[in-house]
Image (cartoon, rainbow, N blue to C red):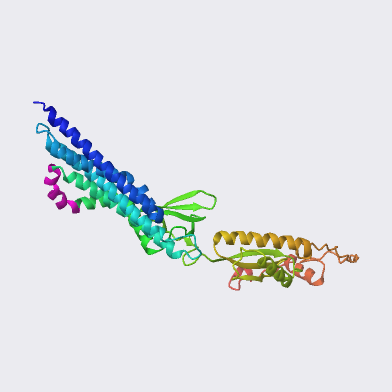
Amino acid sequence: MFDVKSWIGLGVAVIIALVAVLLVVVITSAAARLTARRESWARALILRVRLPYRLFLVVVATWIAVHFTLPAAAPLGTVDHGFLIAAIAAGTWLVAALVGFGLGLVTGRYRTDVADNKRARRAQTQIAIVRRLASIAIVIIGIASILLTFPGVQAVGASVLASAGVVSIVAGLAAQSTLANVFAGVQLAFSDAIRVDDVVIAQAEWGRIEEITLTYVVVHIWDDRRLVLPSTYFTNTPFENWTRHSSELLGSVEFDLDWQASPSQMRERLDAILAETRLWDGRTGVLQVTDAVGGYVRIRILVSAVDAPTLFDLRCHVREHMVEWLHQSAAEALPRTRILSVEPASHPTSVPVSTGQIGLFTGTPEAEERASQFTGVLPVVGDAGDPDRS
């Protein structure tokens, strides 16, 4: 029998619950806004947890109202089970948002826009990995909690746990590459091999570490391309990390000049160039003759800067100004290729002397005697034991 009063009472109870939720939301929002005027973290908290917080309150309040006012003819068990699943899902979202806010608050304490930001970059890298691991764990726990609300899943829970070893082996064999990348991502985060904002050379490309996830690493290349590499690349392949301990670097500028170049004058000009630029950090400014073979003298300039981008600009700056100075003030030092033209030497004409035909058997008495030995009558020496030749 359809009980109108019971259903009206259910509707009234739901409305009252929603009004109560509205009052709670208004009060908490007002308190959060007042706090946000003094603390910046309160504003971030409002933006991050506002939706899951309101959804969780609505689900719980509605569940309570429906549970106590639902007519007897309605399937209370099924309705309660549905609200339980919704409450677990909303609660999982809320917990994930709170954990993300807390880790984000910790990340904000480590600034990377300072000169010595090694510790900050390491902390941000590790916190980013922890945030992803925490999010995955919260989602898995939420899904498992929802599944455990079904009696059938509870009944097979023991057998699932008993066969967990076999399942883990099969899953491990089926997802070797994925699991290897996951473990490599955790290893990178906590071994301090690379950090967010590190300058690296990977796959012959120069760039910065933009993002480190559990399975891949994103490298922001200097020309705004993104190089996405699996985490195992940085654990199995050698790569260059230019900011492993500090961001300060040395760079060289080389010139092949003529032997008339004056290293002392170039050294004075280098000092003047470095003194008038802010790109140089003042640590190293050296000019040396590193080679002097063939037709050129090799001049190497070694300079230093606070980081890789600044060093690149400094090298270009020094090279440009030094080339301009060579053209204007030391043109004799510019590289040249010298060619020596040699005239062929003149030799006196000799009068040929006729010596006759000279050979192995003609032309000289010795040669003719040698020829006679081959062309004369040769005596025949007989055998002493032969009676016919006696």
Which residue is nearer to you in this view: 167 or 336?
Answer: 167
> Residue 6 in the image: x percent, y percent?
13, 31
Q: Quadrant of residue 288?
A: bottom right
Quadrant holding the N terminus:
top left
Secondary structure mainly formed by the magenta segment: helix
Decide if residue 5 is in sight here. yes
**Is residue 93 depicted above or below 127 in this figure?**
above
For the point 71% across and 71% down, the residue is 268
**Is residue 62 depicted above or below 361 in this figure?**
above
Which residue is nearer to you in this view: 276 or 13?
Answer: 13
| Residue 227 on the magenta span | no
Which residue is nearer to you in this view: 155 or 132?
Answer: 132
Left or right: 356 as drawn, with respect to 285: right
Left or right: 41 as drawn, with respect to 386: left
> Residue 350 in the image: x percent, y percent?
90, 66
- State which region is magenta: 151-165
> Residue 99 in the image: x percent, y percent?
31, 54
> Residue 27 in the image: x percent, y percent?
30, 47
Left or right: 298 as drawn, with respect to 90: right
For the point 48% across and 49% down, the residue is 226
